[in-house]
Amino acid sequence: MSDELRIKLKETTDFLKAKGIENPEVGVILGSGLNDYADRIEDPLVIPYNDIPNMQAGKLPDHRGQLIYGEISGKKVILLAGRFHYYENGDMQKTAYPARVLAYLGVKRFIITNAAGCINENFGVGDLMLISDHINYSGANPLIGDNLEELGPRIPDMTYTYNRELREALKKRAHEEGIELREGVYMMFSGPTFETPAEIIFARTVGADAAGMSTVPEAIIANHAEREIIGISCLSNMAAGVLDQPLSGQEVNEAAMLVKDTFKKVVDMAIEI
């Protein structure tokens, strides 16, 4: 499997380099309702996922399914506008493939974003939460199978997955701009169902502050390759059972729209620091 994966990664990265992508410094993975950040790049190189060898777009309407390359704050940035979620395919290797591509291209810093349900009742809808740690409750791991030794060790340490120094620097910058950033633990469920109230009670009991259906696969891949990682959750709704009301995907997009300007500022800062 590792030889087959190497061949695919070479095909993909050779294609992207031929398109003009060279020496990217930062990779930004945009979550549900947050794809408008891609418009920050002027004169971008835009490549649909479905045009890239061995990549494919997810089917959610609010995910553009595009790789966008250009400069932000003087740094070469690749934006992944949209995900191919684990629940869409049941294959963690396909889910994590775009993150592997970023690592193979030499991206040094990953900024991984998502929309998440808020578990911590001291936080609120519309808050941005820096991820300090995660709980992988998806039942899968993208490193299962043969290891790509050129990217990282067989059994990588996960103690410092989300860079502490970068979090502190980002909180300081945000505070100077009058932006309060929360900080907490993100728990990944497989989806596609929202969590049940009982599952949210369980998540809170084991230490989670927010719940979602993404981010962890990309963070595992980036950590395996010893890259810097900043995780940012847009708390788009109170998780199941916190309020006595049903959940809907529409809430996610509405909350993202409300916080989009602040989100853009914070991601800019995360690129710059």
Image (tube, rainbow, N blue to C red):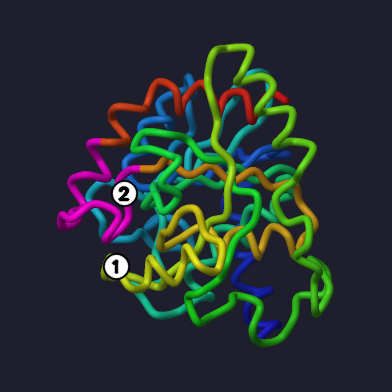
Q: Which residue is mark 2?
A: 238
Counting other residues with Cα less than 10 Å from the Cα at mark 1, is it few (<14), some (14-19), or many (20 or more)? some
Residue 60 x/y as whole percent: 26, 56
Q: Is residue 260 left or right of residue 167?
A: left
Q: How many marks?
A: 2
Q: Which residue is mark 1?
A: 197
- Magenta range is 236-254
Q: Is residue 17 above or below residue 1?
A: above
| Among the two numbered marks 2 and 1 on one chain, the one whose residue lies closer to the N terminus | 1
Q: CA distance from mark 2 to mark 1?
A: 11 Å
Counting other residues with Cα less than 10 Å from the Cα at mark 2, is it few (<14), some (14-19), or many (20 or more)? many
Q: Residue at x 46, y 23 (%)?
A: 40
| Towards the viewer: 25 or 199 | 199
Q: Is residue 241 magenta?
A: yes
Q: Is residue 109 above or below residue 85?
A: above
Residue 196 visible in the picture: yes
Name which residue type carries label 2.
Answer: Met
